[in-house]
Image: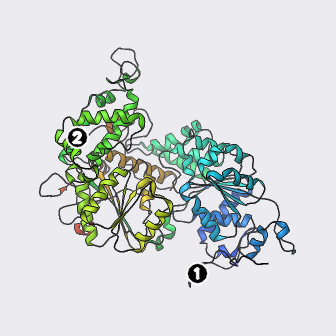
Amino acid sequence: MFKVPFEDEKPTFHSNQKPPGPSEPFVLSGTIRVPYTINRYLRDYQREGVRFIYDNYLKSRGCILGDDMGLGKTIQVISCLAAILQKTGTWQDVENNRPEFLQSQAPSTISRVKKVFLIVAPLSVLYNWKDELDTWGHFKTVIVHGVRKEEELARVNRGRCEIVLTTFETLRLCLNEFNSLEWTAVIVDEVHKLKNFKAQITQAMKDLKCKVRVGLTGTILQNNLEELWCVMDWANPGCLGSLSSFKNRFSEPIEQGQKHSATKRALAEGREAIQALAKILCRWFLRRTKALISDQLPKKDDRVVYCSMTDFQQALYRAVLDTDDVRLLLQSSEKCPCSSGHSRRKCCYKLNSAGVPVRHMYFSYLAILRKVANHVALLQSKEGTSKKQEKYVTAVCEQVFKKFPDFTERCKQVAFEAMSDPIYSGKMKVLQRLLTHFIERKDKVLLFSLSTKLLDVLESYCMAEGLEYRRLDGSTKSKERIHIVKEFNSTNDINMCLVSTMAGGLGLNFVGANVVVLFDPTWNPANDLQAIDRAYRIGQCKDVKVFRLISLGTVEEIIYLRQIYKQQLQSSVIGNENARRYFEAVQGADGQAGELFGIRNLFRLQTDGTCLTRRILEREGRVEVGIMTASTQATDERVQKLGCWEPGANPREHGAQGSSVCISRYLCTTGK
């Protein structure tokens, strides 16, 4: 009978380089061992991770592997699965995967106790999991997703697979069908997606009938400590107590201890809470950082460019802040003048003059201010607003535009994409000079933006300048993405790739790039770090320069500083570091909005070149490097200097090109 050819061993990498590890199994217990075919490629810290997962599996409890991105969480899970399923990495696995009546008559030594594992992952990496499983072993896998999901679930029910791959949404929609099956363990990739205990997907994952729950994430704590509680409570229900007790015991003392003006007692209580939490977490949570592989990575220079808005931008920004609605918002928490004792927004001032609830206006105006801070042409776009907001936001923009008839007239005359004139965006003025510098140096640039409409403007600029570029956003199909990445990495003629932060910030390998520009910051620092890690990862041969563009004195500066606040919290709790205490603010604490939180901090404009970041650093007394802004107002493009360069540093080396652009070093830890 004709036999389909299979490789004798998996994995088989066609390379002259000898595997770094020993060609022997990694014994976990008794007959449970990672086959030598895999073990020879593992690093010591990865073996430690495999043992961590297996030890928790033996005890029928969940765990979280929280390693930094790029440290091989996927291969650690696959190694553990290969051991539990008693794989050999050889032809014997293929033989054992056959139906019994087709197997050779030689008795198998493999246990016939049926084990089926469920892997839940975002759709963007689902097929990558299938590829990795096929690369590292002979596993019987099935993907339950799309139109054939019922058919595939029936196949699982008949015992014809070992590993099932599905998405979060498919599991939520078919929870009853998944619960009709008996799972040995569930592995959830990007488990931080379960950070909101009220979310439907979190509830579905908690309702999945399976005791052994393994989560993978490099960013378990993205915004606040309650997210950490939620993810850990999914893995091991009740391991950190109730949410209210967690807040009292850990969240509140830790956050109070992070304040710039914290008393000695608050500092001591905060540190004590961090130590107590770390002692509990170490049983179920394991995290290693890129410091483990620092010798294999190039340098990363992470800088912030504070861009002054143009005169036109500032006028438009002020016009938005001067609207009656914004005044209504700013007064919304004050006591109502009717003497009811209630706040204005809950009493006589629930609605604006158009009948729109005050509580609905907050996000609408926040979206408008972010658009103006980036590029005023974005006000012509409905992107970033919900259908409920769309009509209202359009009316607001029309009201503001009445003060600027010339702009309105030009918008009618030219296409939206042609609005790359730098008078509409201080950032565009700075970016033009940065790009000129990068192209002269033959750098390859990844340019990220949250807004696809802004990518349209940037694309128009690239075409006008004759730049060779590629573009990747949410509309780019999976196969085309792979082609774009390969082409960019291998072709010297392509100067730039325009990338949507949310669509292109995960699962892509852009090691051909050595410059990353983040045109606009996100509320969640993990999103920006994911984008940076598209270029700064294993396989990168060049030093990487990162430039974050922030509109000076606007809501963007608050967004950026909130990123720092969140990363300080993460560094203290997860990284066990003594993070610097820059801020007075405490998130969610009444009366402690400080310089970061509350509506008044968001709806204001710091004028006259004032840099809030600098003021905070001066208060801390830690302006080691200095803060500099890229001035767009002076006709001679001179730099408005608020600090100083590093001793002995040459501004040209940092992309300053004499006096046109100035860069400030990113002063706070963002992860290596």
Mark 1: amino acid: His
Residue under pointer 2: 316
Residue under pointer 1: 14
Q: Nearer the viewer, residue 348 or 569?
A: 348
Q: Quadrant of residue 358 in the image? A: top left
State the image coordinates of residue 295 (x, y, percent, origin top left): 47, 73
Upstream in the sequence, badge 1 or badge 2?
A: 1
Above-or-below relation of 28 to 392: below
Question: Which disc, if any, is residue 274?
Answer: none
Residue 618 visible in the current orientation: no
User: What residue lies at 35% left-to-right and 24% top-to-bottom?
Assistant: 334
Q: Residue furthest left?
A: 636
Residue 500 visible in the current orientation: yes
Q: CA distance from mark 1 to mark 2?
A: 59 Å
Look at the image and tell me in which quarter the N terminus lies: bottom right
75 to the left or right of 251? right
Q: Secondary structure at mark 2?
A: helix
Q: Secondary structure at mark 1?
A: loop
